Image: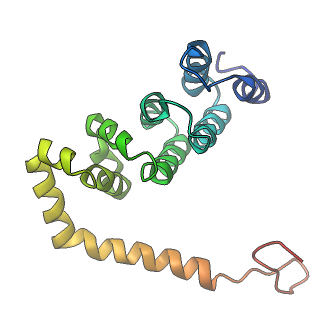
Amino acid sequence: MVPSTNAAYVKLIVSCLDYEFDHCYLSKVILQKALTSTCETARRWCTRFLSTLAYRRLPNFSDWGFRLLLGQLGDQSVKVIRHAIRVLHTWLPVYQDAARWLRTAQLDSFGEAGTLLKVHIYADSQLCVLDEEGTREAITLWMESFNERYVEVIDDEMRDSLLTVRRTISGTFSRTSGER
């Protein structure tokens, strides 16, 4: 796979592979190649595909899957990084042992998103003991300033989800669920 490979072909190849067992090493290598050396559209799709694989609860996904997701945090595309952060936030509470991989990542460069990702590290008491100074700094940050920012973010999300009104082209109100 090269950057000029059509995204549809990348999707077809990646989605048809078997990731179920440890002996499917070649499938994971192909997925890693698709995550790093294809066009942006394919890299975004492959990053979201990792969420599908996480949903399937594959054996050892907390090892190889989260390492691939953390690799996506170094992508040149902001959209790929955003998708990787969303997938990490979604699945780190489910795969709690995968939080150990976050310790090696440079999360400070992602601003508020990095601060929120660090929360998953501090949810594990063993990881807190390993980095007592970092834990103290994080608690201080949350107590001094970030707690207010977190409440603002949650308020904005709640306001958007509850009060956003959508209109159709004809001017009538549409259902947000899309159902009739």
Question: Observer-nearest residue: 126 or 111?
Answer: 126
Q: Residue at the spot x=80%, y=81% of the render?
A: 167
Give the x, y percent position of residue 107: 31, 44
The image shows a total of numbered marks equal to 0
Q: Residue 119 sits in which quadrant? A: bottom left
Nearer the observer, 14 or 107: 14
Q: Residue furthest left?
A: 133
- Residue at the spot x=27%, y=73% of the render? 147
Residue 140 left/right relative to 78: left
Residue at 9%, 49% in the rendered image: 132
Counting from the top left corner in percent of width and height, residue 15 is at 72, 29
Q: Nearer the viewer, residue 33 or 21?
A: 21
Find residue 178 and report its image quarter.
Answer: bottom right
Q: Looking at the figure, which quarter contains the N terminus?
A: top right
Image quadrant containing the C terminus: bottom right
**Relative side of 159 to 170, left or right:** left
- Compared with 167, 137 (above or below) is above
Horizontal side of 167 relative to 115 (left or right) equals: right
Q: Is residue 154 above or below residue 112?
A: below
- The residue that appears at 30% across and 39% down in the rendered structure is 100
Q: Is residue 122 above or below residue 2?
A: below
Rendering coords of residue 151 (x, y %): 36, 77
